[in-house]
Amino acid sequence: MLSMRHFIYDFLIEKGLSEDTAKYLNMLGLLLALLIIAFIVDFITKRILWRFSFGIAKRTKTNFDDILITNKVPRNIAHIIPLIILIEFVPQVFSDFEYTEDIIEKILKVVAILLTLRIIRSLLNSVKDYLKTLPRYKDKPIDSYIQVFMIFAWLLGIFSIFAIVTGVSFLKFAATLGAASAVILLIFKDTILGFVASIQVSINDMVRIGDWITFEKYGADGDVIEINLATVKVQNWDKTITTIPTYALISDSFKNWRGMMDSGGRRIKRSVIIKTSTIKFLTDTDVEKLKSIQLVSQYLTNASKIIATHNQKHEIDKSALINGRNLTNFGVFRKYLQTYMDNHSAINKDMTLMVRQLEPTAQGIPMEIYAFSKDQRWQNYEYIMGDIFDHVLASVKYFDLEIYELALGNKD
């Protein structure tokens, strides 16, 4: 290039052009030649690296090299050689234009920094995409860590660019920024909070990708589809997307349903309110009538014998039902529901299962079913729970009980 520079310049002088004109035309000719060479080298390098990478990807079993190609890592690396050629020969092209040479060199150094950042980003994206294909890391907030690395890389890159443009040494420039750390912390407050939150979320295993969470403050109720440095994206059941600040996961309260999903059951906790005025002691005739209900037939037979033996032993006057031990329609109904749930095929019998009477209210006495369905899928869970309470509501009348209903003018 050096001999070429003198050759073009001397040729133009021999043709009778002035020195200034010869210098400009010489510079333009050399610049054009350098750009053409850089373009050809870039094209050839890209083709060679692409063929080399594609050949390796076809022969290996891992898909990491395929991901590298998809994220254009070989193509970005190919730009390094022509950039080195430009940086090396630009001083020769602009040797007669020192001011322009200085500007062009700074521009090329900035381009080199940006290219380095681009290569780092494509490499990190490749690592992220590869880790997400592994079951062990599939539900981890990989995006958060990649973004943290990229933030540090961009900060170093920006500091380096400012140092190159201003001519100030990198260390001196960084020291100057240290004095303005309060302002920097204020600007990157959300990023810092998100970074800390991401670490705590990962270490404490609070949320994973795929978890079902409920976050009432942000109106989120659905599956976590993405966790990154600044936000957590939740796809709600109506297919809308709710974005939650990552730091909110450690500063606010939310519900993660993973424990329920891992437990093997989904809780059913619902009650019906029985009108107090319909609760009564059962006569022998009532008991005989209820024995036709198969689920409580054996219970009534056994309980009647035990009660009769007790009352006879203590010579209880049964002319009034309140005396001695007695069965009530409410108690028999509770036993019926317990037996019904014990025999229900969709209920997980290895988890808590009970039918209980809650504290009386102004409307009546709540009868609550507390159990866990085997099927945790929302649609099936709702069907199971609906089926159970359809039966409960329909069976109440067989025990001469009534469900409380709020109606205009209701005095009960």
Image (cartoon, rainbow, N blue to C red):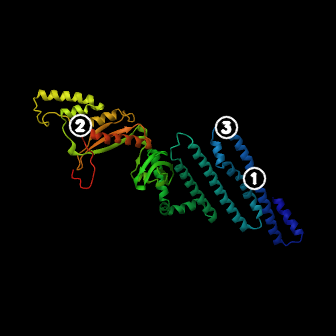
Provide residue 352's location: percent of width, then percent of height: 33, 36
Q: Earlier in the sequence, mark 1 or mark 3?
A: 1
Question: Residue tagged by mark 2?
Answer: 331
Instruction: Tell me if label 1 and label 2 are in contact, CB under 8 Å.
Output: no
Asked whether 121 or 254 is in front, the reply is 254
Between label 2 and label 3, give the one nearer the viewer: 2
Q: How many marks?
A: 3
Asked whether 411 or 233 is in front, the reply is 411
Q: Vertical placement of 350 versus 153: above or below? A: above
Q: Amino acid at mark 1?
A: Phe
Q: Amino acid at mark 3?
A: Thr
Question: Residue tagged by mark 3?
Answer: 60
- The answer to whether residue 138 is left or right of residue 108 is left
Inspect this view and state whether residue 337 appears: yes
- The answer to whether residue 23 is left or right of residue 138 is right
Q: Label 1 to label 2, Cα distance in Å? A: 87 Å
* Residues packed near mark 2 inside 10 Å, few (<14), some (14 to 19) or many (20 plus): some
Question: Residue tagged by mark 1?
Answer: 43
* Residues packed near mark 1 inside 10 Å, few (<14), some (14 to 19) or many (20 plus): some
